[in-house]
Amino acid sequence: MKINKISLVQAIALILIITINRLSIHLPQTILTTCGSAAILNIVFISIITIAFVIIVTKLFKNFPNLDIIDISENLGGKFLKYLVGIVLISYIIFTCAILLRDFAEILKILYYGDTPIIYLIAFFIIVCIISNWLGRKSVVKTNLILTIIMVVSLLISFLAVMPNLTIQRALPVLGYGTYETFISGLSNLFTFNSLLVIYLVPSMLNNPSDFKKASIIATIIASVLVILVTAISLLAFSFSTEIEKISSLYMLLSNNEFGKYFQHPESLFVFTWSLSFMSYVNVCCMFIVNVLKKLTNAKNERPFIVPVAIIILIVALLPKSIMQIRDFGDFTSIYFGTPLTFIALPMILILANIKHKRLHKNNKEDFN
Amino acid sequence: MKNKTLNSIKEYFHKLFYEEDSNDYNFILPETTNSIVTNAATNFETSESLSLDNESLKTSDTSNDKVFQSIDVNLEYVKVRFNSMINSDIQIREFTLSARNKQYKAFLLFIDGMTDSNIMNNYILKPLMLKNSANSFEGAQNRVVSEVKTNNITVRKIKKFDIVEYISSCLLPENTIQKLNKFDDIVSGVNSGNCALFIDTLDIAFDIEVKGFEKRSLNTPNNEIVVRGSQVGFTENLRTNTSLIRRYINNENLVIESVKVGKISKTPCAICYLKNVANSDLIAETKYRVSNLEIDYLISSGQLEQLIQDDDKSSLPQLISTERPDRVANFLFEGRVIIIVNGSPYILAVPGVFSDFLESPEDLNLKHQYANFVRFLRVLALVITLLLPGIYMAIVNFHQELIPTELLYAIIASREAVPFPILFEVLVLELSFELIREASIRVPSPVGPTIGIVGALILGQAAVDASIVSPILIIIVSITAICSFSVPDFSLGYHFRIARFVYILLGAMAGFLGIAAGACVHLLILNNMQSFGVPYFQLHIFKTKNVANGIILPPAFKREERPAFLKTKRPKTQDHISMKWRSL
């Protein structure tokens, strides 16, 4: 009985939650800073590249149904490669999760909890993360599906809410700082989709291996649409030269909007939904990490890993000293480590594994003949 | 010593990482295993085969089955058809019938609890079994009707002795007797409370009216009151309850199995299901759990519920408890399994999923527009009763900007004279309300309203006047209380009452972040739970098409499917176009 396997929709939600959470923080502002008024054009370009890339990755996985990147690494390079890939993935996921968590906690602190220690706020996420993973993968995945839907709906509502405040002229000049900056230097914005790293871990979780392609592509398309919308709204609502980096640009948009007499500032309700989705994000990250750890150690029981992983996330989240340091750390690792890992290193492993697979297949055929 | 310590540490870690938790009990309801029934049930070709009468619920076509002349064959047939080996209330009384000093093997078929045993004993069994002037009369076997003598040849017109006529007119002093030769008619009669008399050598059976339901002693349900619907509730007597269910189901596929629970008490329990609808694994799992209870005694269905539920740590109800026979009949038709405990008027239905506890028994009796309106109100009430005090805490402590400035001023002004922190104020008032509620349940009914008046009106007003609580909080707690009464299920209401306090604390600790953490954990717990192999909470509740078991109820003619999670042998309840009269 496939108790812990996940369905197509659940897989889409898993991939999506990792991507869309960054939208409510400073991601749109980073894109605006690098591309100026060409941010929309740049992100459309990046999205197309990402979708094409995901299609290629799904093709590379075709020969390895039900195997994730850890299993494939073991097939390709034995235990050494398995441990290397596993440890790199674990470190990266822990780091990005912790940094993003701290970033969100800092935003909450600035907005509502001025006198509260940051550890107190992060502890809420960590406790939920421990409880969720203790309850099991099934419960994390199912809850994530519900919370992803809530998050997507909340994002769409916030887009609709800020629609009247948009000025089309802010997208001009269309090419922003220039063609080179938009399409060549702007390639660094691929980091927006670094979170697609999880698609390398999803195949072994799927109930039906043939759903992998669909799940990856659909999730990437939905994530692309949302990223384009958030970038467009951020660009059209503020002048790209406006410094709104300290807190979430989406929050700023909502708080500057008029919602009528009775609900003067409903943005705190959006913060509520974003908190929920961040909790789900941390749960999912922890689930992936524990899953990789379980594979690396061949353990049967994953529970002993949960608390140490959660504590490590907490410690890493507490390391940076200020919100600017967090963002510097985050952007640096995303651009110089996350992007090469997601878009170069892991696909290389897949390509090599495919070559090995073809050779083995060919040799087997020759032996048979 | 050192090695021993090292070994024990090694063993501990090995256990920790490489041994699975032995406490985990994983039962997942598989697809139905009875393929014959599935095929028969899913192929809906004619409108006749769709109506939920006797005909449609059969696994194979029995409409042409006729009574056999051999009593042994008839006996075997009814035993198989009524599942008499497991069906505890199906009674077959074999005896020897005396008619004109001749002995015939015979048997009576009836359902215990639906027939009047006095009538059966005095007016059926006595005349048939006891030797008396009627059945020991040794008259001529053949009666001469007319006689003509011609040329020393006598031509006699003889009416042969007719045992059927003889039994019907001489031995059965009953006013309603039918002679039937089709098994379907006989089964229908037995299901409706008659008894069937089969006699050896006869290819007919007597359908004798001996209905004897419990009528006067039945009461209206106390806690599941409806406006449009049956006003009959279950009683403490198991057999009365099974007969109440049979009156609704009226089908031989309804199996009522007897189980005794408790080593000392040996409490009679019954497991009921529709054999050709319910999932076989669900039936087996229910029987397995009920039969494997090593307890000394069992008094009520509430105790049994706690003993057979999947998750004993969660305060959420996992089995549906009802005192209404119409609701139970509905559950059985859906494909659930029912458990009756002798001595308890509350009957358990398994599996129970979250959406079941938001349904009122009345929903299905109302037009879908009305039902959806009240369902929406119920969901709204549920959210309010769970979160309102917590949200109030969060807004007042952390998110003041959410509410209009005027309202914020009003709240601050109303709290000005109150010397306590908001958390204390909310907890005191919520606890007071819970005390009043508990007291009003325990006190004798004539005093109940007094407790309400004293508690709610006098104490509330006095507390505001004494500046112990703010008036706005009285409004918040009152709204919460009113909404809590809208939760249709008693057990779910308890769960929300407890959870409300947790949300109050979380709201006080971290505002919306705390409430979000609570909501996330709540969702995780809901998603982790199972009830008899069925996920407790899933997105099926948002399915609006073709099922009656969702948040939105479709019109009656569109309730075509049974809940998918039950994985029944008959996935459909009606044809795609059930109202054939419209298309004719």
Image (cartoon, rainbow, N blue to C red):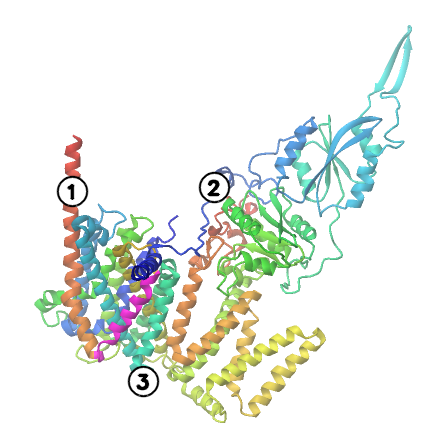
Number of labels in the image equals: 3
Q: Secondary structure at mark 3?
A: loop
Q: Which residue is mark 3?
A: A114
Asked if badges 2 and 3 are on one and the same chain, I answer no
Along the line of sight, the residue nearer the viewer: B40 or A163: B40
Give the left or right position of residue B532, taking residue B100 as reference: left
The residue wearing badge 2 is: B33
Q: Vertically, is A53 above or below A315?
A: above
> Considering depth in this image, is A231 or B522 the residue closer to the camera?
B522
Q: Answer with left or right where residue A41 lies relative to residue B286.
A: left
**Residue B434 position in % (x across, y down):** 57, 77
> Who is closer to the viewer here, B365 or B184?
B184
Q: Is residue B201 left or right of residue A261?
A: right
Which chain hosts label 3?
A
- The residue lying furthest to the bottom in this view is B417
Give the distance between the C-alpha atoms of the residues marked 3 and 1, in whole angstroms: 59 Å
The residue type indicated by label 1 comes to: Lys
Q: Quadrant of the N terminus of chain B?
A: bottom left
Residue positioned 48% across, 64% down in the render: B314
Q: Please determine whether, in this image, residue B114 is positioned above or below residue B133.
A: below
- Which amino acid type corresponds to the residue marked 2 in the rendered image? Thr
Q: Magenta includes A314?
A: yes
Q: Which residues are magenta?
A: A303-323
As drawn, the label of residue A358 is 1
Across and down, in percent, residue B513 comes to 37, 76
**Distance from the alpha carbon under mark 2 to that under mark 3:** 60 Å
